[in-house]
Amino acid sequence: MTHPVFPFKKGVFLADFHIHSHYSRATSPNMHPSITNRVAKQKGLSVIGTGDFTHPGYLEELKEELEPEGTGLYVCKDDPDGTKFILTSEVSNIFTQGGKSRRIHTVFFAPDFQVVEEIQDRVGSIGNISSDGRPILGFPVKELVRIIMEVSSDCFVLPAHIWTPWFSLFGAKSGFDTLEECFEEQSKHIFALETGLSSDPQMNWRLSALDKYTLLSNSDAHSPPKLAREANCFSCEPTYEAITAAIKDPGCGFEGTIEFFPEEGKYHYDGHRACGICMKPQETIKHKGKCPVCGQNLTVGVLHRIEELADRPEGFIPEAAKPCVHLIPLEEIVAEAFGVRSITGRVKKEYQRLIRLGKSEMNILLWKSEEELQHIVPDRILEGILRMRKGEIKISPGHDGLYGKISIFSEEEREELHSSKASSKEKAVQMDLF
Ligand SMILES: [Zn+2]
Ligand SMILES: [Zn+2]
Ligand SMILES: [Zn+2]
């Protein structure tokens, strides 16, 4: 896989729509506009979702901290030139349809606080929207789409991470085989699909049924550092109307996506985490879908599910396909370059230093040339960035809820680093000082 470094036009901006607030389960207390505003700037995002607008307590916070810009987007009152916020929220519908139990996650966009209040009134009268930032509703998702589009036809519907086995439109465990089966007469409101971390546009291009939908990518961040791990690129005006119009008609300024390497996603391959089993789709079929250790059903991942529904071979590129770039978060590249497996204090410090010099993470990963980077990035990190850009990396695929593991440097290179460190303390000191 090679990735062009500059597939996007100049003057574009990046937007990450699907995130969560501190009101969602398993989410960092730092998921709060004052903090996400700052981190989004470091990442290089111009627009981020608020997440969780269905939560009444969070809406109060948003009203206190944000002010309308007059464009359908909001900004922090104390940083009006900072990140722009778009009102978004994810909802989980758990229901029975067609005789089967279904669990579907959907992201909604709204143009202003008034519309959000009305959505809260309508949905709050038939379901519990206060217990979680991402509420669970016990009725069909098509009903929710009907209600929200009735409140305002300016709202926008985005089926979330459409391939994850649990909780998604096409999920192997509790999804549907076609979009129309799920949304029925409400399908007319759907113009875009979120590919999720475990799949990329290339994988989705294999289904001709998806050609008419714009493929979006978002971070689904539950903590600030995860922002922008996937994002969308636009060349339109940064307004609610222009952004949603560009998603509906990509000719009006939707330019493509920033992608996670899909193998790094939590549900790329099949597997059974408890037994340490990870399998390619072909192997799963050979084992008749059963875990060879415990005999239980394997969790079928995204690659397998796409293979089941695809009507085109691997590598097919539809005519209207938009460019996408696969990136590895800068902290992970720094950790790899340092030869450590996790984001240590030293990694975070180096990350902050690079951001100060390079202005933003996306500037460093995406926009700056090799020559420009040479002035600010130590050799080994630069080598990591260049290998990422060329796709010259190894990934042990994610499965059954476990993230995949990226290796930019080989075991040999890693050992060289450690032995050179041990033999020359001076060199290590120099690297720290760089
Ligand atoms: Zn979700
Ligand atoms: Zn989410
Ligand atoms: Zn097992």
Image (cartoon, rainbow, N blue to C red):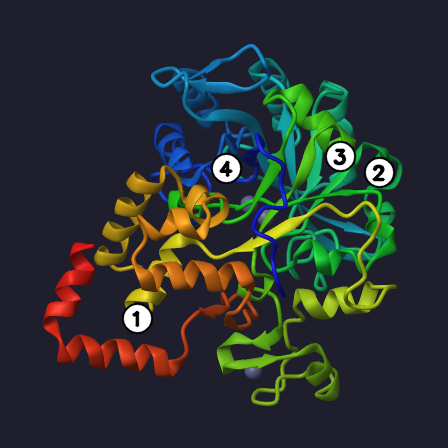
Q: Nearer the viewer, mark 2 or mark 4?
A: 2
Q: Amino acid at mark 3?
A: Pro
Name above or below for residue 217 compared with residue 316.
above
Q: Nearer the viewer, mark 3 or mark 2?
A: 3
The tag on residue 250 is 3
Q: Residue furthest front?
A: 371
Nearer-the-camera pick, 161 or 199: 199
Q: Nearer the viewer, mark 2 or mark 1?
A: 1
Identify the residue at horizontal 46%, vertical 68% (top origin).
Answer: 406
Mark positioned earlier in the residue sequence (3 or 2)? 2
- The residues bearing labels 2 and 1 have C-alpha atoms spaced at a distance of 48 Å
Quick one: SS at disc 2? Answer: helix
Asked if the residue under mark 1 is in contact with the one under mark 3, i.e. CB atoms within 8 Å, the reply is no
Asked if the residue under mark 4 is in contact with the one under mark 1, i.e. CB atoms within 8 Å, the reply is no
Q: Residue furthest left?
A: 426
Nearer-the-camera pick, 51 or 410: 410
Examine the image and state in which quarter residue 42 appears. top left
Q: Amino acid at mark 4?
A: Gly
Q: Amino acid at mark 1?
A: Gly
Residue 366 lies, in percent from the top left, at 50, 47
Residue labelled with disc 2 = 187
- The residues bearing labels 3 and 2 have C-alpha atoms spaced at a distance of 19 Å
- The residues bearing labels 1 and 4 have C-alpha atoms spaced at a distance of 37 Å
Examine the image and state in which quarter residue 267 appears. bottom right
- The residues bearing labels 2 and 4 have C-alpha atoms spaced at a distance of 25 Å
Residue labelled with disc 1 = 339
Q: Is residue 182 left or right of residue 432?
A: right
Residue labelled with disc 4 = 133
Mark positioned earlier in the residue sequence (3 or 1)? 3
Identify the residue at horizontal 35%, vertical 53% (top origin).
Answer: 374
Q: Amino acid at mark 2?
A: Ser
Residue 401 lies, in percent from the top left, at 53, 65
